Image (tube, helix red, strand yellow):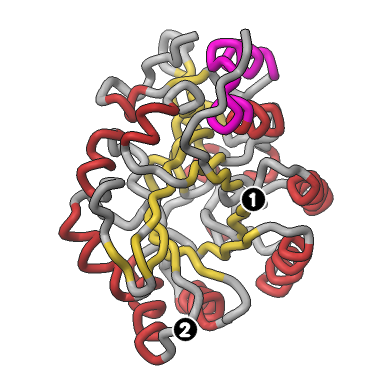
Amino acid sequence: MQATPPRHRFGLTVGPLQYWWPRDQMLAFYAEVADHPAADTVVLGEVVCSRRNEFKTEDWMALARDLAGAGKTVVLATLPLVTTEAELRTMRRLCEQEEFAVEAGDASALAVLAHLHEARPGRHAFVIGPHVNIYNRAALAEIAPLGAGTWVPPLELALDAVAHVNPAADPVRGAAGPVLTEVFAFGRLPLAFSARCFTARHHRLKKDECDFRCRDDADGLLLATSEGEPFLVLNGIQTQSAALHCLLGAGPALAAAGVHRLRLSPCSRGFVQALEGFDAVLNAGAPAGEAVTQLRAAGLPGVLVDGFAHRRPGLTAVAA
């Protein structure tokens, strides 16, 4: 079947790494991303637990410069749950640097970024992260003029709701123009965060004496129901879906919702195939069914679902 290129091109963003991979594995992953033409934006930073300190702020900055040198747009993400003074200092340091745009993980980062943009309007526009609770147009219209350039909707928000919040025909305007919408389109969904570490608790350890056990789980620690069905994933203080959210076949709905960019969350197996599949289907017009079948055969760490995007139960399987 001949591919028909779509009229709407989506930017593809490699989202922040949610797991704690060994340093060599992580650097190898980002080296592959740097060489891949489909990825045009990369979000970097620790977005789960500050105890994962093998990669420090200076290391993230050095990696960001390398990726920028390879032609990628780089965004630095802050933690979605800030609980200590040390985490607050790190957040402020990320926000205050001016080399790269920043993704606000929570309201404290929004406040710092808004103050910085008021003092210096020419700074990079910031990204409103998916864990900032913006569920309606009024909320987005209130925050956007503070310096926002991109909005990542909450992960469970359906695409038709996204269209109502920031429609293509009448987008919310930020400090420097219309706010772009970037939708989480692939990967395990981070559903909740807690001050407790679930991985440490599973291993009967204290949070501050966790032995860094989450390094043992490249894609998180899988939980199953009493019937043996995959249900949730423990990832430190984060609870994720066991299935992988995948909007590979939702091109028309994404375009109708005014979506500009798609976020793909890294996993240890099959991620490059996912990146290539999204580019082929949504930007080059390849058949979605074939790409879904190929992706299912790529050894992913979970099944593919897309229910939240279409107002159905989250575990609804992607149709082939």
Tell me if 213 is positioned left or right of 113 in this view: right
Q: In what element is the residue under mark 1?
A: loop
Look at the image and say whether residue 172 sits in the magenta stretch.
Answer: no
Q: Are marks 2 and 1 in contact (CB under 8 Å)?
A: no
The answer to whether one can see residue 6 in this image is yes
The single residue placed furthest to the left in the displayed view is 138
Relative depth, front residue between 135 and 248:
248
Q: Quadrant of the N terminus?
A: top right
Q: Label 2 belongs to which residue? A: 122
Q: Find the magenta span and give its range.
A: 280-298
Task: Indicate whether 155 appears above or below 296.
Answer: below
Number of numbered discs: 2
Residue plotted at (67% across, 41% down): 38
Amino acid beneath label 2: Gly
The single residue placed furthest to the bottom in the displayed view is 119
Q: CA distance from mark 2 to mark 1?
A: 23 Å
Q: Label 1 belongs to which residue? A: 40
Majority secondary structure of the magenta segment?
A: helix
Determine crowd level at label 1: few under 14, some 14-19, many 20+ residues with C-alpha closer than 10 A: some
